[in-house]
Amino acid sequence: MGTDSEEVIAQRIERAREEIALMSEYDYTIVNDEVSLAAERVKRVIEAEHFRVDRVIGRYRNMISEKKLSDK
């Protein structure tokens, strides 16, 4: 720590500004501040995506339709 030159630090800050400016283009933000935490955050995003309404609603609608057909 504390071994980067001012030039390297300035480049990192500029890159961070660019990334923050683009942040609104994405649904999720994961900062790789600590690898194990970042990996856990990625897992959580993947899990959340599996349960998005637009991904599962068709399955539930089909279940209801099939139930109605089997009741007849």
Image: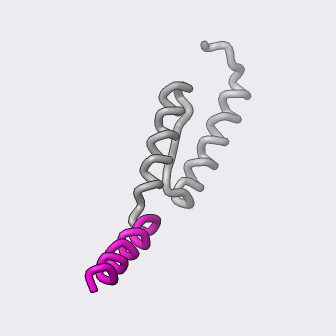
- 66 left or right, relative to 55: left
Asked which quadrant contains residue 70, the reply is bottom left
Is 55 drawn above or below residue 49 in the view shown? below
- 17 left or right, relative to 67: right
Is 14 drawn above or below residue 36 in the view shown? below
Q: Magenta stretch: give its range.
A: 54-72
Q: Residue 69: where, in percent of width, then height?
A: 33, 83
Magenta residue check for 26: no
Split into 4 quadrants, where in the image is the N terminus? Answer: top right
Q: Residue 4: where, in percent of width, then height?
A: 69, 19
> Residue shown at 57%/54% (left/top)?
21
* Of residues 68 and 10, the one drawn nearer to the viewer in this rendering: 68
Is 15 drawn above or below residue 57 in the view shown? above
Q: Residue 56: where, in percent of width, then height?
A: 42, 65
> Magenta stretch: dominant SS?
helix
> Residue shown at 40%/75% (left/top)?
62
Asked which quadrant contains residue 9, the reply is top right
Q: How many marks?
A: 0
- 39 left or right, relative to 62: right
Asked which quadrant contains residue 16, the reply is top right
Magenta residue check for 70: yes
* Of residues 22 and 54, the one drawn nearer to the viewer in this rendering: 54
> Residue shown at 60%/46% (left/top)?
17
**From this viewpoint, which residue is outermost toward the left?**
71
Split into 4 quadrants, where in the image is the C terminus? Answer: bottom left
Q: Residue 3: where, in percent of width, then height?
A: 67, 13
